[in-house]
Image: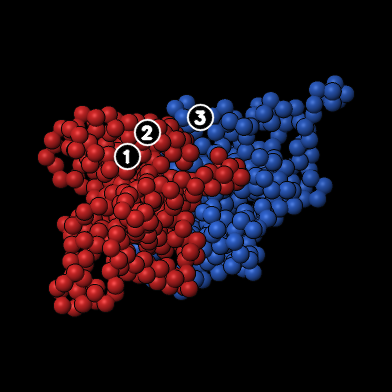
Amino acid sequence: MLEASALTLSYDGRPVIEALDLSLPGDKVTAIIGPNGCGKSTLLKALARILPVNAGRITLDGEDMGELAPRALARRLAILPQSPRAPEGIRVADLVRRGRLPWRGLLSPWREEDRAACAGALAAVGMAELAKRDLAELSGGQRQRAWLALVLAQGTRWLLLDEPTTYLDLTHQMEVLGLLRRLNRQSGTAVVSVLHDLNLAARYSDHLVLLANGGLVAAGAPEAVLTPANLLEAFGLQAQVMPDPVTGTPMVVPLDTADRKVSA
Amino acid sequence: MRGVALLVLLLALATVAALLRGQIDAPPAILWQGLVTGDGPGALILDTIRGPRVATALGVGAVLGLSGTIFQTLFRNPLAAPDLLGFNAGAGLALIAGIAFGIALPAPVLAALGGLAVAVIVGALAYRRGSGTPALTIILVGLGTGFTATALATFLMTLLPGTAAAEAQRWLTGSLAARNWGHAAQVWGAGMALTILAFSQARALMAMELGGELATGLGVRAEPARWRISGIGVLLAAAGVAVAGPVPFVALMAGPFGARMTGARSPAARMAAGAAAGALIVVLADLLARSALPGLQLPVGVATGLLGAPYLLWRLSREMDKGDL
């Protein structure tokens, strides 16, 4: 469990999250959703200790996160920031190897477990064949999978991702989200992503967290969170919610003003 | 691997050439005789005239090259070098101030204090709450601060008596004239110690190169790491400036040149390549400066300036093409 209690966060000196209580399941795929500026990314960064906590506390599997040593935390929880920038001319394999940094000392040799972790991560994202290529030569989807392999090689039980589907077309968005869910099902990794697309979030997540105005609107199963009332409260959006004809997960159909007149 | 061998070979050839050539060319036989017997004109050249000068040049180039590579890796920007960031100018100003006001501190200490002071000023001016500062902001603030330091140094120079002012002017350009074994020992001693410190940060640099947020996720405290690594970089540059003055553009060129030549990828490999490339650049530039024009010994800074200015323009145009400027 990744738990926040009475959590208050600010960004650039302005409060973004206020007195938030939240509990994220340790065995599921979670998506954090909400309108722009609602504090989704800020919350995720605080959960990975990239941003300091102003008040309240965060516990990771029962331990106060503030008391974990940086490296101890990095062995349990990995974060992939939004659109990370790679060093010029780096190869996929070299990028992925850096995911082993928390496990290695300055002079420790490259061990079998490090090699296995990198090979496993590359295989999991289907990039084994592209390992020798320059990252810059790859397509956007392939690059994103290479970054995913880096955090997978970190070998953590928790994986946090800030908008892992930005700048990807729909096919690659589904590919990345499907990969994360498979990872959860196969190795029990707890996945927490900030996502923009509500329908994709509902389709690929077990647990949704809906934020608005620095507070929690709803959290729970997609069916319980994506209701017309919650959408209205969080986004100010009139919408109908119906089961997705393929997966049965909730599907949001927004209504604009004209539609509303018709339906009324 | 072939690139590494080539770089080492070039460095060795440049060193030998720098010992052989000058206002008076010394045939290899005479140098050899001097080396073996410790006597004659060859020994004079090796011991007093060119030996210490070349040794100093190698050390100065290595520390400047290493410093540049560290900053370029840390800020993920090929323009981030201690010369453009103003640290060299700060070290130079402190040394001129030391002469002008008769401050009785050893040159390396003065240079280090000046470089660190500028680093703190640049860091404070460029600091932005919360979000990380873009590298370009730091570079621009560094350029401005560096110009200010250079202007102040020029002003202080006018307060000096004529001969001292001429010497200071020459020195501010970056000069290796009349360096003795004391200078060489100084830059090599400080350089060795700082190099060990620098390589101890290779792991942190590997993480920081991916950006502060990902570095934090990989278990490296980003903010302390940034200051720690910057501090080592400033001290390395100051060690070079203390014996040769703020030789321009070496730190800027060495990293990319070394990496291109050797194909080095990891930060540690690039640091080693950058140090070797810096040494090569300074030895060759000094050789050029003192032997290109008969009867005229130019300061080494003039030669690195002539090499570096076109490089900077080329680099700027490339950054503009990439959309980073």
Q: Amino acid at mark 3?
A: Val
**A89 vs A127, nearest the viewer:** A89
Crowdedness of circle 1 by 10 Å Cα count: few (<14), some, many (20+)?
Answer: many
Pointer 1 and pointer 2 on the same chain? yes
Q: Is residue B323 left or right of residue B35?
A: right
**A234 vs A26, nearest the viewer:** A234
Residue wearing tag 3: A16
Q: Residue at x 38, y 56 (%)?
A: B292
Q: Is residue B95 above or below residue B272?
A: above
Which chain letter goes with mark 3?
Answer: A
Which is nearer the N-term, disc 1 or disc 2? 1
Q: Is residue B298 left or right of residue A61?
A: left
Q: Amino acid at mark 2?
A: Phe
Please say if the residues under marks 3 and 1 sit with CB atoms less than 8 Å apart. no
Q: Residue at x 69, y 31 (%)?
A: A231
**B145 vs B99, nearest the viewer:** B99
Residue wearing tag 2: B147
Element carrying mark 3: strand
Residue wearing tag 1: B89
Q: Residue at x 57, y 44 (%)?
A: B317
Q: Amino acid at mark 1?
A: Ala
Give the residue furthest to the right: A262
Chain B representation colour: red
Chain A representation colour: blue
Give the residue furthest to the front: B295
Element carrying mark 2: helix
The quadrant in which residue B287 appears is bottom left
Please say if the residues under marks 1 and 2 sit with CB atoms less than 8 Å apart. yes
Disc 2 to disc 3, how far (Cα)?
40 Å
